[in-house]
Amino acid sequence: MAISELPNSRTEPDGSAVVRVLSYNVRSMRDDEDALARVIRACAPDLVFVQEAPRFFRWRKHAARLAAACDLVILSGGATAAGPMLLCSLRATVERTEDVLLPLTPGRHRRGLATAVVRLGGARVGLVSCHLSLYADERHAQAGLLLDRVAALGTPYAIVAGDLNERPGGRAWTRLTKELQDGRAAAPWGAEPTWPARAPDRRIDAILATPGVEFLACGVPTDLDPGDLETATDHLPVLAVVRIPASPPGPSA
């Protein structure tokens, strides 16, 4: 099924929202930015969970340039979250955002989470973009902290997406999927491997969600320009279409 054949973003009569979600490690935008923007635009996402967003000199300018090129706006994250970032379309009404730094292990890379709570149609949903450690012990601990952050959002539903740096079945992946649905397992669509972009042979990127969120499709798009996918960054994008039930009004929903 081509991207164009996936369900379109919409609000249902009952207030539930059909939403396109993209997760993408952009390698600090060190590759072909035009190709990167073409890939993101072709997926027509409502929400983009970015990993390895620009973090250094004039990082806000670079992030803003990417958002503008994709007809999106910056929601949260970037250097203030140590790399994870959230972008959204104007369809999303923003309730709050927070950038979270995870505990630093001396000698290792600092990790963080970009988080937000938004409304789409009648649905209220928490969002977390993550990029877990390369080290198994730290990665497992970060998975627990990530689940704690999801619970702290206080929303009826949540979507978590990112570069888990681990294949399905690993300790961190298993810890996460005891509480969260794996979108690819729930509604496989497209291709499965996400890394490396030029010859993908493993799935280390995922879109996850709390129970109640319905996955309609999830996977790596197969009908995008192969040249763009190979030159945009070193990961492949993961695209999902989800249906989020309507939520009662008010922040205590």
Image: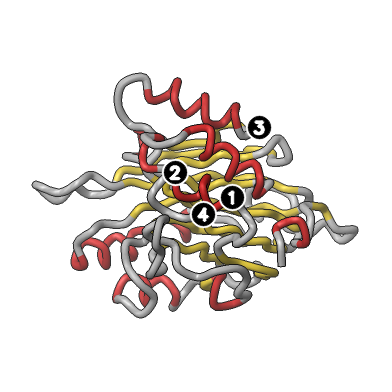
Query: Horizontal and vertical percent for residue 130?
Result: 40, 52
Query: Which kind of residue does numbered mark 2 sit on?
Result: Thr
Q: Could you tell me which residue is drawn at 28 percent across and 48 percent down? A: 102
Query: Which kind of residue does numbered mark 1 sit on?
Result: Asp
Q: In the drawing, what numbered circle is on residue 225?
A: 1
Q: Are marks 3 and 4 in contact (CB under 8 Å)?
A: no
Query: Horizontal and vertical percent for residue 170?
Result: 31, 76
Of labels 3 and 2, the one closer to you? 2
Residue at the outermost right position:
13
Look at the picture and state if 103 lies above or below 158.
above
Of labels 3 and 4, the one closer to you? 4
Q: CA distance from mark 2 to mark 1?
A: 10 Å
Q: Are marks 3 and 1 in contact (CB under 8 Å)?
A: no
Q: Circle 2 sits in a helix, a strand or a loop, which is it? A: helix
Instruction: Specify whether 150 is left or right of 4.
Output: left
Q: In the drawing, what numbered circle is on residue 231?
A: 2
Look at the picture and state if 187 lies above or below 244.
below
Query: Horizontal and vertical percent for residue 30?
Result: 36, 34
Q: CA distance from mark 2 to mark 4?
A: 13 Å
Q: Could you tell me which residue is drawn at 55 percent across and 69 percent down? A: 191
Query: Which kind of residue does numbered mark 4 sit on?
Result: Pro
Q: Earlier in the sequence, mark 2 or mark 4?
A: 2
Task: Quickly name the residue at label 3.
Answer: 71
Residue 168 visible in rendering: yes
Q: Circle 1 sits in a helix, a strand or a loop, which is it? A: loop
Q: Earlier in the sequence, mark 3 or mark 1?
A: 3
Q: Earlier in the sequence, mark 4 or mark 1?
A: 1
In the image, 115 versus 34, the foreground residue is 34
Q: CA distance from mark 3 to mark 1?
A: 19 Å
Task: Quickly name the residue at label 4.
Answer: 237
Q: Are marks 2 and 1 in contact (CB under 8 Å)?
A: no
Crowding near pointer 3: few (<14 within 10 Å), some, many (20+)?
Answer: some
